[in-house]
Image (cartoon, helix red, strand yellow):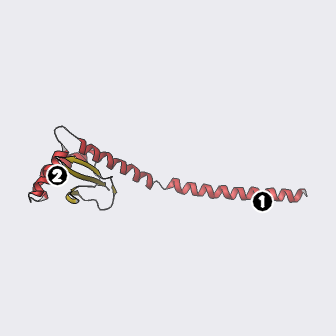
Amino acid sequence: MKGKKAQIEILGLAVLVIVLAIILIIALTFNLNNNGEDDVRTGLIANNLLNALIKQEGKVNFKNLVFECYDNIKKEQTMESGCSNLNKEINKAVPLLIGNKEYEISFESDAEEFYKFGSCKIGIESTKYRFKYEGITFISSIKLC
C-alpha cells in the first residue's frame, strides 16, 4: 500500500513540474516580446508631441499657422506656397523634439485633408486631435516611424 501511495505522489509532483514549466514558457514569451511596449511608448510620444505643437502659443502659434494654410488653400493656392510658414515651423520644431525619426503630420477640415507633411507610410499614429480656430474645426494627427 505504501508503494502505491508513493507512486501517486511522485506522479502528482511530475504533473506539477510540467504545469509550472508550461507557465514559465508562456511568461517568458510575453516578457521577451517588448514590441508592444515600444509601440505604446511611441504612441504616447506622438500624442504628447501633437498636443504640445497645437497648444504652443508665443512667437509661433501653430493654430494660427494651420488656419493661414487652410485659408490659403481655400483661396486655391498650392500647399507649397500657401503653407510655407507652417512647413518652416514644423521643420524646425518636430526634428528638435524627436530627433532624426521620420514622421508625417496631417491636418483636415470639413472631412477633407488639406495638409500633409513628411514621409511615414507605416508607423504609430497619434489619436486625432480636434481644435477650433476662427470657428472652424480642425482635426490633426502625427505618425512616427
- Mark-to-mark CA distance, 1 and 2: 71 Å
| Quadrant assignment for the N terminus | bottom right
Contact flag, marks 1 and 2 (Cβ < 8 Å): no
Within-10-Å neighbours for mark 1: few <14, some 14–19, many 20+? few
Query: Which disc number belongs to residue 87?
Result: 2
Within-10-Å neighbours for mark 2: few <14, some 14–19, many 20+? many
Q: Residue at x 34, y 47 (%)?
A: 45
Three-letter code for the amino acid on which mark 1 is drawn: Leu
Q: Residue at x 25, y 53 (%)?
A: 139
Q: Secondary structure at mark 2?
A: helix
Q: Residue at x 22, y 47 (%)?
A: 132
Three-letter code for the amino acid on which mark 2 is drawn: Asn
Q: Position of residue 20 (x, y in %)?
A: 66, 55
Q: Residue at x 23, y 41 (%)?
A: 56
Asked if residue 91 shows in the view, the reply is no
Say whether disc 1 or disc 2 marks the residue closer to the N-terminus.
1
Q: Position of residue 108 (x, y in %)?
A: 22, 56
Q: Is residue 81 left or right of residue 135?
A: left
- Residue under label 1: 11
Asked if residue 28 shows in the view, the reply is yes
